[in-house]
Structures are given as structure tokens and as C-alpha cells.
Amino acid sequence: MRVVKTLAALALLVALLAGVPAMLIAWGDPSALLRVDWRRALVQPASKELVVALCSVAGWLAWALLAVTAIVETVMAMSRGRVHIHLPGIGWLQPAVGGLVAMVMAPALSSTAAEPAPPAPAHAPAVVEHQISPTITAHPFVPPAGLRAYVVRPGDELWAVAEQELGSGGSWRTILRSNPGMTADTVLTPGNTILLPSTPPVQASAAPDSSGHVTVRRGDTLWDLAEQHLGDAHRWPELFQANRDQISDPDEIDIGWRLSIPGAADTTQPRDTGLGQGDKVSATPTPSAPPPVGGTNQPTTLAPTVSPTLPPDTTPRTSPLAIPVMTDATPRATNQPSNGATGNATPVTTTEDPQWSDDVLGPVGGVLAASLFAGVIARRRVQLLQRGVGRRAATLAPEIQRFFAALVQRSHVAPELQPNAQPTSVIIGWRDEEEVRIDLEPRRCTLVEGSPEDTAALAATIITSLMCAPWSSMAEVVTVEPQEEWVLALDDPRLSSEMHLEEALTRLQRLCAQRRMAMGRSNLASLRADPDVAGSWPPVVFVFCHGLLPAHVDHVRDCLSLGEVGVSVVAPLAHGTTSNGDPRAVHVLSTSVARLGGTDDTFEPQLLNQPARRAVVSLFTSSLDDRTEPAPWWRDGDLPPHVTVPPTTAEEPIKDDAMPAWSPLPDHPTLLVLGPVELRGCHGERPGRAVGQCMEYCAWLLLNPGATASTMVRELLVAEGTRRSNTSRLRSWLGRNTEGVSYLPDAYSGRITLDPSVSSDWEQFQLLLAGGVNVASSPLLREALSLVRGRPLEGVTFQWPWVAQWVSDMESMITDAAAVLADRCLTEQDLEGAHWAIDQGQLATGDDETLEIRRIHALALSGERAELDRAVMDMTRVARAENRDLAPETIQRIQHALHLSMTRHAHS
């Protein structure tokens, strides 16, 4: 049957491409047009010769269009999609002709795909998206050495494949390097095959020879070579500059190259490992185990290093107080540092990828990063307010947590906002550290010229800026044919989308015409100055996410030719289309160079590339997720038979002075995080600088005992030199115990671990309530809450970008503990104890709805009707101001409190 279809398609193509010209030559005569007297022909009925001649010309033009389309489809089919040709005017004909060409070429393509690919040279694996026919079994596709085949499944994207198969979504560039011809915007077709690294065990690079050169081995990157041979991975540009004769792209170095190491020939000293004073690593490199077959994204189990202090069969020793609140049912990988923030928090991954944040963020400025950060924080706040007692807001994926941490760090360099910025003003880049801004509304139509990937990245930058920047709060945005789910992720009424180009152009035309007619003799400025009608005239920006053809650009300009109606357009041009010298155009020449139309001055563009767009959408989507998960500090199931719970009531009221107070001068170093951050009990001298960073390192090491230096660099987003210096300062500040042992021992094994006696008030809080908040006795709850001095990590939350999830868990657990104790006190009519528990909880969380409703209950029991009404009114006003609804349980408890208050008032 397949042969019959192939022969029929071939016959039809031959008839169209060869038979039609033969018929036109035999029956047509275009030369008759040269003999026509056009003055008579235009006023008299057409003769037979004229009709035949005109039909012949039309036939030749149609045949030429058909032939060009067939050639284009043949080239695209033979290249298996690697070559994309876009010609105007043939789009309507391509589906039919493409189908015929595909039927004719199917046998040839299938036989080619069935033959083993020739071995590719080590420096250039050259296979991209091989089509695997389901009927071919005799000769399966054999990938080149060092690579493996992956069959694309429905819904796959570059980021998802990298996250699933390579362990990190930020490794998507590795897929591009393994598949020449693939770009970041390549659409993965289900059933096609792409090449992925086979991820053999990483081998250490050879040491520089006597001439100061090193030979590149599989898996090496400039970052890794700089870290190994120069002592600091951030010095990779020195390697790049020293080998410009070989390296044209710093992301691509070939196996077997001999690279010059700057300064290596002048010294024979071993490199600085960056593990602190006296730190050393074992001479034999410890390869990490390859990921399991099948590409599951599981934590990698590391082979333990051989060292005098860490036997090969043991895991790093952890502090006795750094215990999980509840036991996690999922087993951890060997030597996997645990996160002490929560019992089942995501473990710190050991995939060494120090450039992850830079690769994903790319050229994103501080203002845009700060705007994104503020938007996410506001949504996460609503998540915490709406969670139930004993539940925890859904945790972010590790990759998204790192992206969020990178946003926090980048937002620190944001300059002061301009007070006179217009709603449609966007930052599109920088020139000599100065922002390059354009105001979209006065420009009306802003054309963007460049590669499809770069224009899409700039369009995404404009969308996120208009939706998140504080000065753009009045702007409305319409995205046209977006690749990402912007509307679903941002959930903002100012944002809408059109999934079809023609419908978007119709909407643009209708909006401009309606506004022009509604304006009458008024102008836009006078209408916006009138407070009664200003709300009906917000700026509207249409952002097209795919390149427009010249005909579409002309349509857009026709719509905007009605004058200033408050509507503007950002329109990327189709690849190969030019702006024809439009002074309002933006020319993106590369990822690092752009210029504005009408000028030769260049600037560095601000681009939100595809991985960053995916991360932003995932971050905002997760911040709107109202699902919760069981809190690890809450006991839902039955207790073991040998465990008894002390009674929640006491015969005598518990007095505050019976509670042991937290020692202001502990015997060993103790980090206080349940309030303003302090490090007490140190036996060394307080450093003169970087005190806050030393406390940050101490907190991170308490949560991640046994971590490596490279993991610390990656998670804290600092340079290796900075990490080494601050670790040394922290070691000196902590000092030594009475036995002369350093509280921060030298990491001879490569693992950095604090002494078990170093602890924190958060660990003490967890220890007191380790069995579960809801089953802990009231005295333990009071003792735990007495440790709270204010908001967790007060004053440093925005300086420590990695603590978002930790702070969320601390606030949630403190709230639950306060709620449980308050409920018990209310049951016992102990109103003073209830108010104390609520006050302690609100020290950490502010006016939390979970605690405020219990205060309302306490006010109802005490009969203070005026205070009760004021508290209810304040709660509803706060909810309206935050644009959210009160939880159903909260509404029920408010109604119960009001009824209780009225009943007591009637009885009195």
C-alpha cells in the first residue's frame, strides 16, 4: 500500500511539474500579447487569442509558484527539518505540496535513517533529530561515540528534556552543542531522535605540562579548567583570552585541544583548592556515579572520598540538633547533605553546575529582576495566609529555587527608580552602565529586527517589564501567539492574549477605531487628565511574539494611523525581513549587541531567553498554586503503641517564670535566627568586616552539613575567592572549644562540616516539637514559642537569596505551634495564655489570619464587643486590600465568635 501511495504521489508531481508546462507549450501562446492593440482591446470584447494568451501567462506563473514550492519542500525534507525556508506567498500551497513530497521522499529518508550513522569526529557530533520509522528494526540508529539517542515524546521541550535526562534544566545548552543546527527555539517533534551526552564518569583534566599547556578531555569546560588550574572558576575569561587562536566560542572546546594555562609554566606549586586554611583533598579524584539508565531525575550517589577523617563507608557527621521534625519516607542518597529546615525538604543536589544562574538569567538587569522578585513575594505571601494549620505551602522545585535566588541577588544592583517614568516605558538594555529606555506609546509601532530567538527574547522582556514594573501598573498588555502561558502564570486582569494572528489584527483595528470615534474632538492627554474618564483610557500595548511579514506590518501601521489613541505595538519582524530604515526600530544584532534605528550607537540588550522565560512562568505559576502538602512538623497518623501523649490540660495553670529562659551566653556558638540574626557564644574575635556573610555561611552550613566547596559556591552565588575568605573569617570567629578543637574544622576530606556543638535556636525549636506540633504538650509549646524574638531572619531576608523556603517553613511552623497552644488555652478559658501564644506567633508572622481569628475568639470569650468588632473589621479590610477572600474556616469562626459575644452579652 505504501508503494502504491508513493507511486501515485510521484505520478501527480511529475504531471504537475512536467505535464503542465508541456500543455502550456502545446496550447498556449503568450507571444500573442505582443501583437495586441491594447487601445482597442480595452474597449472591445476580448478575442480568442487574447484570452488564450492571458490564460497562458497565468498558467506559467502558477506553475512557477508550484515549482518553487516543490523545491523548497524537497530541500526541507532532505535536511529533515534542519533547513527552514520561509518565502512569502507560498504558505497556502505548502501543506499540499509538502504532503506529496513527503510521500515521494519517504522511502529514501527511511533507508537513510535505518543505516548506522558514520562515526563523527570527537570535536563535532553532527546528528540532529533523526526520524525513526516504526517499521525499521533491522538496522537501528547508532549514535556517535560519547552520545546517546533520545526519542522525543509529546510535550517535550529543551528545558524539560535537560531536566529529566541530564539532571538540570540549565543544561539545555549541552543539548544544543550535541545537535548542530538546533537552536533554542527549535520545536521538538514527537517521534524524532536527538542526541544527548552519554554522561560518562567525569575525569579530572590532566595537569599542565612543563610548557604550561593542558589537554582537553571529555566533559571539560573553561569554567572547570579555570577552577582546577587557576584556583577560581570565575577566571575562565583569562583562559579564553590566552587561547583565542583556537577558541572562537567559549561554550565549545574540543577534545584533544592543548590549551595554554596563564602562568602555569612559571610555577610548580599545587593549585589552591579553595577549601579554607589547611583544607586538602585526596589525591585521587572522586568520580560521580553516572545517572541511572532511563534518565530519571534522582539525586546522584557520590563515591565517598578517602581521607583520615571520613572513612569510605560513612556519611558526613551531622549536628545532633539538626534533626528532621518528622521522618521522611523517601530514602536519601548516600552522602547526601540533608536540609535541616524541614524534615522532608528537597535535598541539596550534588550536580556541579556553578554557571546555572548565569546561564538561565542571562542579560537580565537589576530593575527587571527586582520587579519579578516583588511580584513573586506578594503572591507567596497570599499562599502562606491561605494555608491551613498543619499544612505547608507547596515547595518550589530546586531549579526554580535557584532561579529565584539568582533574581534576589541580581535585584540588589537595581538602581533607583525614575519618578517620572511613563507607564509604557521599558528598559531594553544598557550603554556604558546607563539604562537604554524607550517609551512605547509615543513610538506607536516599535519594530524589532533580528534572529527569531533574539526578537522573542526581547518581546518577553517587554511583557514582563510592563506587567511587573511598578511604574507600569496602569498599562494593559495583549500578547499575540505567545509560546509561554503568560496569562495563566501572571493571572493579572491587565494581561490578555490572542492565539491567532488574524484575530489579533482584527482586535487591534477594532480597538483603534473605537477609541478614535469615542475621542471626538478631544485628545488623549485631556481625557486622561479627567479623573472621571481616565480609567477608560489606559495604555494598551500589543506584543507580537512571532515575526511579522511585510503585509502584516502594513496592516498594523494602517491601524495605528488613526492618531494617538493610547494603543502601541511591539512587532518582531520575520527572519529576513528588514525595517527599511525605520528610526523607531530596534535592531538586535546579537545577544550582546543591539542598536536603535536611526543611530549607529550600540548597547547591550536585555533579553529574556527561552530557559529564563520558562523559569519565570514556572515561578509565577507555582506562586499561584493553592495546593498544600502535609507539614513535616504535624502528626496526622496514629502514634506508635509505645508512645503516650501527655494531657493537654493541667491541674494548675503554668506560670511563665517556670519556663527555662534561653541563655544569653551559651557555652558553644549558637546562631539565633528566630528574630534579628545574632551569633552568640563564639570563642574567637568578631571579624572587622563581612560579619553578615559569616553568619550567612554559618546558617547555610547548619542546614547543609557535609557540603562541598563547589556546592557552597553554587548555592550561595558567590565567587570561590569570596567563599574562601569568609569561611576563614567564620573559622576564626567561632574559635575552638575547651579541648582545642576548632568549631569549623579544616575540610581535609573535601566536606565542610561544623562541630556538632554548634547549633541554632531554630534547631532547638524543632527539637522541642520533634514528635509533632499537634501532639506536643503545652509546656513544650510554650517553651518553644518563648524562643521567638521577631520575624525569622529579620533584617537579612533580602540579603540572603537562598532562604525563601526556609523562612516560609519557619513562619508556618511557629504559626501552627501558636495556634495549637491558643486553641488549648481557649478551651481551658485561659485567655491570658491564649493572648500570649497569639502574640508570640505574630512576632514571627505579623497579622496572620490563622492567629488573628483566634484573637477574635478570645475577645468574644472576654466579652469585649468593641474590640471584637474592630478586629473583625480590620481583618476584612486587610483581605480586601490584598485582593483575596477570607478562608471558609475563618468566616465560620468569625460568625461563631459574633454569636458567642451576643449570647454572653444577653446573659449578662
Image (spheres, rainbow, N blue to C red):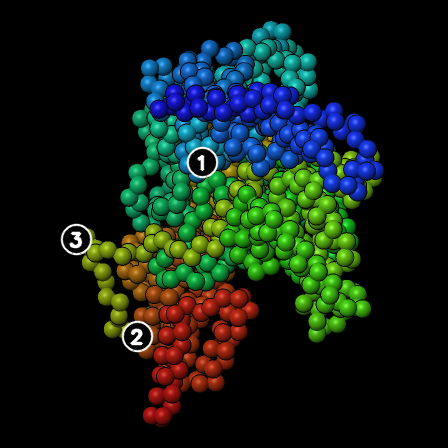
Residue at the spot of label 2: 827
Rendered image quadrant of residue 635: bottom left
Note whether residue 14 is visible.
yes
In the image shown, does 565 or 494 lie closer to the viewer? 565
Q: Position of residue 906 (x, y in %)?
A: 36, 92
Which residue is drawn at the image coordinates 48% and 55% (left, top)? 624
Height in image: 180 above or below 367?
A: above
Of pointers 2 and 1, the one earlier in the residue sequence: 1
Mark 1 residue crowding within 10 angstroms, few (<14) / some (14–19) / many (20+): some
SS under mark 1: loop
Q: Where the N terminus falls, by quadrant? A: top left
Rendered image quadrant of residue 521: bottom right
Q: Which marked residue is nearer to the observer: mark 2 or mark 1?
A: 1
Height in image: 726 above or below 890?
A: above
How many marks do you count on the picture? Answer: 3
Amino acid, disc 1: Asp
Note whether residue 234 is visible.
no
CB of mark 2 within 8 Å of CB of mark 3? no
Q: Position of residue 716 (x, y in %)?
A: 54, 39
Mark 3 residue crowding within 10 angstroms, few (<14) / some (14–19) / many (20+): few
* Badge number at residue 642: 3
Which residue is drawn at the image coordinates 37% and 66% (left, top)? 819
Residue at the spot of label 1: 156
Amino acid, disc 3: His
Q: Where the C terminus falls, by quadrant? A: bottom left
Q: Position of residue 301 (x, y in %)?
A: 36, 29
